[in-house]
Image (cartoon, rainbow, N blue to C red):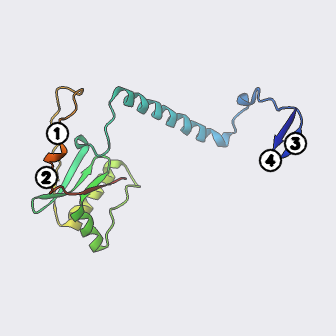
Amino acid sequence: MEVLFNGQRYAGDPISTEGLWNLPIPESDRAILKEAREREAEFQETLEKFKRGELVADNSPERAFKNIVVNGEVLATVYVTGVTSMSIDAVQKLASLGLKLPSGGQGTPMQAAIARVEFLAKALGGEIKDAVKPKASSSKSSPPAFSTFSSFSPSIRHSYVIGT
């Protein structure tokens, strides 16, 4: 058999891959393989939930955990996953103080959420209030109704979502 690769000719017999998958796995690679299989199982479970329509975004209203309220206005919402959304006022205040939102790298998502709630309440000088969860609807099939663009008020405020 002759093969052309990068302008060079190579001659030889093809290498058989038969039986390669039956080779013993070194002990040092078994932990990696076990973790890969666990991740694959988690992925398949998540995929099935997605197909059934059971997945909810990290920053969906039903996952809201706590609000940080300053002078009656919600400046930040922290979700049970640790994801945080903040008003532009909150972002500007943190920036003016030279502060950054704590990372969610250590611990569980709920631990990250609690740490962020405490940090934001102190940094923004606000109260911690339970987030209001939407009432369950009787039907999942009908999407919420939205008004047309012409009815939007010019007082819409911007917010930013910061992941874990």
Element class at badge 2: loop
Asked if residue 110 lies left or right of residue 128, the reply is: right
Lower position in the chain sequence, tag 2 or tag 3: 3
Between 136 and 130, the residue placed more toward the observer is 136
Find residue 161 and report its horizontal and vertical position in percent. Answer: 31, 54
Question: Badges 3 and 4: C-beta atoms under 8 Å apart?
Answer: no
Q: From the image, tell me which residue sits under label 2.
A: 153
Q: Residues within 10 Å of mark 4 (few under 14, many from 20)?
A: few
Q: From the image, tell me which residue sits under label 1.
A: 134
**Which residue reaches farthest bottom?**
97
Q: Residue at x 33, y 29 (%)?
A: 53
Element class at badge 4: loop
Nearest to viewer (mark 2 / mark 1): 2
Q: Distance between the residues labelled 2 and 3?
A: 70 Å
Q: From the image, tell me which residue sits under label 4.
A: 6
100 lies above or below 135? below
Residue type at the position of mark 4:
Asn
Q: Residues within 10 Å of mark 2 (few under 14, many from 20)?
A: few
Lower position in the chain sequence, tag 4 or tag 2: 4
Q: From the image, tell me which residue sits under label 3.
A: 9
